Image (spheres, grey):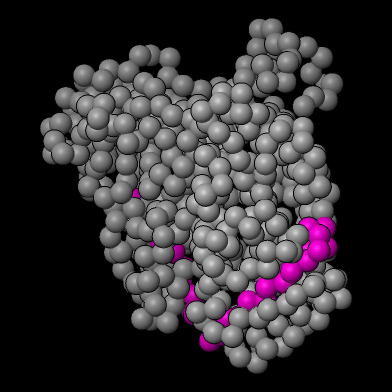
Amino acid sequence: MVDQPAVEPDFAGFLARISRDLPPHCILTRPDQTRAYEADGLLLYRQCPPIVVLPETEAQLVVVLKACREHNVPVVPRGSGTGLSGGATPHPNGVLVGMAKFNRILRMDPESCVAVVGPGVRNLAISEAAAPLGLYYAPDPSSQIACSIGGNVAENSGGVHCLKYGLTTHNVLRVRFVTIEGDIVELGGEAPDSPGLNLLQSFIGSEGMLGMVTEVTVKLIPRPELARVVMASFPSVELAGEGVTRIIADGIIPAGLELMDKRAVNMVEPFVKAGYDLEAEAILLCESDGTPDEVAEEITRVEALLREVGATRLQTSTSEEERLKFWAGRKNAFPAAGRISPDYYCMDGTIPRRHLGRVLAAITGMEQQFGLRCSNVFHAGDGNLHPLIMFDANLPDEVERAEAFGVAILELCVQVGGTITGEHGVGIEKIDQMCTQFSREELDAFSAFKRAFDPYGLLNPLKLIPTLVRCAEYGKMHVHGGQVAFPDIPRF
């Protein structure tokens, strides 16, 4: 399996080649220039890249990737740097290619309800541009004010409205990208179906390991006539989780269904002043959208269900301003953590909804085990957890305990039938847990798919797909001659 290039990169040849076609301001080589690109949003992992290239056109990107292939230089794509799994962490012997300058909205088509945008366009900018047309782009990560659509494609990002409207993969119709050979490929299209194999969904979420995106066609949907949010207080997280189960079981698919525990609520309220109940052990936010009649009927059903489950307080937004304020607390939970902790580690795992109470109780127990605080903020409707582990990076022991805490949460997610990621990707952060989640045969299949696009192993190496050696070290297996002894015995 190709994990990383076996031949040393020729940086001098690479720089000489791209300097013929790219202006000097697009090539950064001094440490004071490249230091800003040493990490994405996961600051636990840092690596200053030897070279940063900032192409401005597709033709320039073709030149850069061809030069990487010709001179054996590993390449790591980067969007806005808001990722939380280390997917854009630079390679120590490679080049980082930033796509921030591909920031134009190329076409807005209200008749077909699509937008064609560059990968550097901010998520929120698409909805802002579509607003005068009565349309918007549904996926809304908490970082939507800054994150780029190219990064959303790389990580298959979601957001608070992904329960009803889907993740990035459900809202992207076409991607245009450049391969490591410099070829331009398009997957998908604006028609209901496209010729050839359906590779679009495999490309979305591939974390820059198959090619670098230059255009994305996204689906736009009409803005609902009305949206209202029910904010419910509960005396326990378990009861709030039961509220989630009851809503879904009753056939209601809310536009958003989010849960915050007491620590998260008390962390966020001074930051946004949303009017949260500071005495509640958990708060559930449930949004309904549609026509006024549809919203009124759904809100009435939701309120009745939540009262039956044991909600101690119900408050429903009465204006768009109030609705946005309720969501502001949820979307600012991560930066609000900086008010009470020097550092925090945002996890991302997904579990079946029926196990919400069990997993949250286990995380509480882990706080005692690892001696660290953890607040829980997550997409309750689809079981996507975002525990925030708080620690002090100035204390090496706390860093190690924070990482171990995160590993324990991810492996518990797998144990109850979930996955190690919902929308943040694998990157560097979760590569060992890939050995827990998947069999060797499955990992080899992933590697074979990558080799079909990148036989040289130059695109974002060391990410996402662990080698047999890495899995062996992580699982304490004995590997000899590339073979595992007694291969029929279950492992991991």
Residue 31 on the magenta segment: no
Farthest residue to the top: give it. 480
Residue at (66, 16) in percent of width and height:
473
Query: 386 or 295: which is nearer to us?
Result: 386
Query: 166 or 192: which is nearer to us?
Result: 166
Residue at (28, 32) in percent of width and height:
34
Is any atom of residue 49 visible in this view? yes
Vertical relation: 452 (above or below) 153: above
**From the viewer's perspective, is 468 left or right of 324?**
right
* Residue 373: percent from left, percent from top: 67, 41
Query: 209 or 150: which is nearer to us?
Result: 150
* Residue 110: percent from left, percent from top: 38, 78
Residue at (38, 81) in percent of width and height:
133
**From the viewer's perspective, is 326 left or right of 57?**
right
Quadrant that contains the N terminus: top right
**From the viewer's perspective, is 425 left or right of 454?**
right
Residue 29 location, quadrant:
top left
Residue at (34, 53) in percent of width and height:
120
Question: Which span is picked out in magenta?
Answer: 214-240
Residue 216 on the magenta segment: yes
Vertical relation: 275 (above or below) 166: below
- Magenta portion: prevailing SS class: strand
Vertical relation: 367 (above or below) 95: below
Quadrant that contains the C terminus: top right
Count of labels shown? 0
Vertical relation: 261 (above or below) 438: below
Is any atom of residue 213 visible in this view? no
* Residue 198: percent from left, percent from top: 54, 53
Residue 317 location, quadrant:
bottom right
